[in-house]
Image (tube, rainbow, N blue to C red):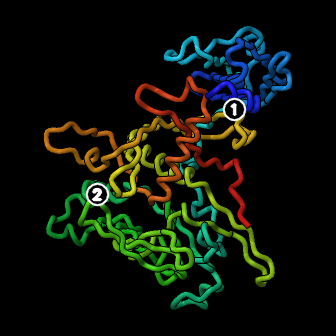
Amino acid sequence: MSAAQQQNEPATLCLHAELLPHIRHITLYVSPPAAVRSQNVRPDICLSDSRRAITVSLPPPHDDVIDTIKLPARVNEASRLALSVAGQRATDPQNRGLDQQEHSFRMQIDDGDDSLLSREEHMDSFVPWTATDMTSCARVRCYHCRNIFLDSYVPCGAGAEDKDIQGWVWKDLPSGNWAEMMDFWHCHKPDPHEGHDHVNDAAAEDPNATIKGYGAANQVVATAGTVLVDVATFLIKDSDCRGLKQVETKSTTTSTEVQMGLCCENCNSLVGIEDTVADGWRLFKTSLSVSKQLSKGGCEDPEWESHPLEVIVAAQLLELIERESARRFVLHCGQGDGLLIWVFNPDMRYSNSSSDHSIAAQRAMKILFQNVVDVDGMLHPDRGKASSLSLEELRLPSSVLSVISETLESRNKMLPKSAREFREWKVGIMHRHDRTKSVKKLP
C-alpha cells in the first residue's frame, strides 16, 4: 500500500479476541491503523468493570481512534494489570522491522465464569432445523425466489384431506452410520434361544427386528405426509412437492456418474437431488427458507427464516468428525477442483471489530485450508502413490462450495496478519450453529 493510500485510508483499529477453553485463556490482538504502524504508537487498553469488554484507543494526536469489543468470556481481575503493561509485539518474521506492528495479550478466564462452552450439550446441538424445531404447519420455499415447494395446506396427492387437518409429520433420521451399526448388531447379537434347534433359527428370529426397524433388511424410505430430517437435507416423497423439475447432472470426475438434480421451476437454482434408494427427493437446507407459523387466511404472510450456508456445512463437518473421527476433508462439487480443509478447532468463540461482524462473540470453528486442483487424484491416488487414510470427502453444490471458499478467504483477511497462516495452510473461520442465537429472519 502506498503512502498516499495510507493517508486516505480511514484510521481504524483492528481488534480480534479468541477464547482458548482448554487453557482457559483469551488471546487479544490489537492492530493499529496502517498510517501509524511505523510511528511505534502504543495503544491504551482499558478493561471494563464487568471484565467482559475491552476498549482500545490511541494517544494524541490520534485520540479520535477508539474501538470496543465484547470478549468471548469474562476474564479475571489479574488481567487488568496485565493489560496495563506493554503487550507482546506480534510481528511477521518475514517482515520484521517493517511497519507490520501488532500487539497481542493473553488474559486468563475468571474461575466463576459460566459462559465457557458446555461439554454436555446434546449430540445434535450443532444441527440447524431438526425435527423438534419444526411444526406441523411448517412450509418450505426456495431461498432465492420464494417459490413454495412444501405447503401444508395445498393438496398433494392421495390423502390430502387428512393432511390438511393433521399437517406434516417431521422425523429426525438416525446417524449416517446407523445402517452399518444395525447390520453388525443384527449379525452378531447373542442368541436368546439357547438350546433351540438351529433348523428353527429363522423362525425364532427376534420379531422386534422387523417391528422396531433394526433388522438387516430395513432401510429408510420416504413416506407421503412425512418429512425426514438429517444434518443437511429434508427427505420428502416426490408427490408431496411442487414447483420442482428434474434435471440430469453429470460429474466430470467420474464419467459414469449420473444423478438427477432438482431445480426450482421459477429461478432454475439447484435445490436438491433425487434419492432412488430412499424413493424420495432430498432438498438441501442451504437452498431453503422455512416458515413455522400458520398464515391466517392469507392476509398476513408469516415470518420466514433461513440459516447461513456456512452453518449448515459446518454441521456436516461436525457430524463427519463425530462419525468418522476425521479432521481433514476435501470439499468439492464433482468438477475437478475443490478445497482441502483441516478442522483445527471444532468449537471456539471469537470477537472481532470488523464492520461486518456482530458486536457479540461468535461460536465458530477454526479452519486451515488450501485450494486443490485435482480432487480425484487426491481421493483416489494412482497405484504406488501414498494416500491419506484420515481424509474424508464432502460433496457440495457448486454454488455452496463457492460461498464457503469466499467466506474462508474473507475471514482470513479479517484476522490479524500474524494469525493468517500456519505453515503451508491459510487460516480461516467458519461459523457453526448456536441455539442461543436467533436465526436470520426473511421478508
Q: Residue at x 24, y 64 (%)?
A: 255
Counting from the top left corner in percent of width and height, residue 337 is at 36, 50
User: Looking at the image, is mark 2 or mark 1 nearer the viewer?
Assistant: 2
Nearest the camera: 278 or 111? 278
Residue 214: give x, y in percent of width and height: 36, 64
Of residues 8 and 159, the one nearer the viewer is 8
Point 73% across, 76% down: residue: 294
Where residue 425 sits, quadrant-wise, is top left
Mark 1 element type? loop
Q: Say if 113 sits above or below 433 in the image.
A: above
Determine whether, in the image, residue 49 is placed left or right of residue 430: right
* Sequence order check, earlier mark of 2 and 1: 1
Q: Is residue 76 above or below residue 241?
A: above
Q: How many callouts does the rendering have?
A: 2
Side of 318 relative to 376 (left or right): right
Q: Nearer the viewer, residue 291 or 278?
A: 291
- Disc 2 is placed on an element classified as loop
Q: Is residue 224 left or right of residue 214?
A: right
Look at mark 1 in the image and give the residue it sits on. 72
Q: Position of residue 316 (x, y in %)?
A: 47, 51
Q: Which residue is mark 2?
A: 253
Quarter of the image with the C terminus in it: bottom right
